[in-house]
Amino acid sequence: MAVAGLGLVLGAAYANSFGARLTLDNKLVLLHDPRLAAKTWADFRLIFTENYWYPSFPSDLYRPLTTFSYWINYQLHGNGGAPGPYHLVNFALHWTNALLVGLWARRLGGGRVTAAVAATVFALHPVAVESVANIVGRADEFAALSIAAALLAGIAAARATTRRRRWTWRIVLGIAALLGVLCKESVVMLDVLVPLQDWLVL
């Protein structure tokens, strides 16, 4: 019920974003990247061997999993003619991230009300608008997903009652961090956040 309620509130807040057209960086990433239309392996592998802004200009940014998500969208829905499905993915990611923030609050000892408030504040905070409404903000949504998953895995590892479970959760944490870095480089902040969480609250 709480999940659906958060989705309704979030949907009301972002309803007008689903019709937003492709502007600014979206045009470069979604309209001018031939990798999104790739049908052969030779073309598809460029997602993992070229930079994020390929072929528009050289860059050190490497976000192959974010680009791969655009490729899936493109293969299913095309690009410029129907940006709605791209917006829907961003919305779903943000909804998921808000739920994970609520779960994180619960794992840290907060009650249901505290968790609901944390999830709602995260979901509706104005700082997230660009990440949700701007399609290329998906990299930020993936980064948040990775960080939330890693922090939850860190809690589970710290509280594990057996060595096997502890290492299982540490592996999950590592996988979440690795996938996150392949979506957006700022996920490296987990090198600080996980130890900080262990020191401050666990």
Image (tube, rainbow, N blue to C red):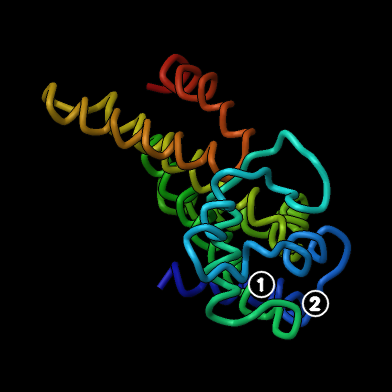
> Which secondary structure, mark 1?
helix
Extreme residue toward the right, this view: 24
> Which quarter of the rendering shows the C terminus?
top left
Residue at point 58%, 52% (across, down): 47
- Total residue callouts: 2
Query: Crowding at label 1, few (<14), some or many (≥20) Cα neighbours within 10 Å?
Result: many
- Circles 1 and 2, Cβ within 8 Å, touching? The answer is yes
| Residue 143 in view in this figure | no
Sequence-first tag of 1 and 2: 2
> Left or right of 167: which side holds 173?
right
Please name the residue shown 52% across and 53% down the image. Answer: 45
In the image, 142 versus 199, the foreground residue is 142
Q: Where is residue 33, by image quadrant?
A: bottom right
Mark 1 belongs to which amino acid? His
What percent of the width, then of the height, locates residue 21?
82, 77
Quarter of image, res 71 = bottom right
* Disc number placed over residue 96 in the picture, else none: none
Q: Amino acid at mark 2?
A: Ala
Location of the N terminus by quadrant is bottom left
Secondary structure under the numbered disc 2 in the rendered image: loop
Residue at 75% x, 79% y: name it.
80
Looking at the picture, how far across and down is residue 185, in whole percent? Answer: 62, 34
Decide: few, some or many residues near mark 2? Use Cα within 10 Å; few <14, some 14-19, many ≥20. some
| Disc marking residue 20 | 2
Return the residue at label 1.
Answer: 87
- Does 174 sit left or right of 70 as displayed? left
- Residue 32: quadrant of the picture: bottom right
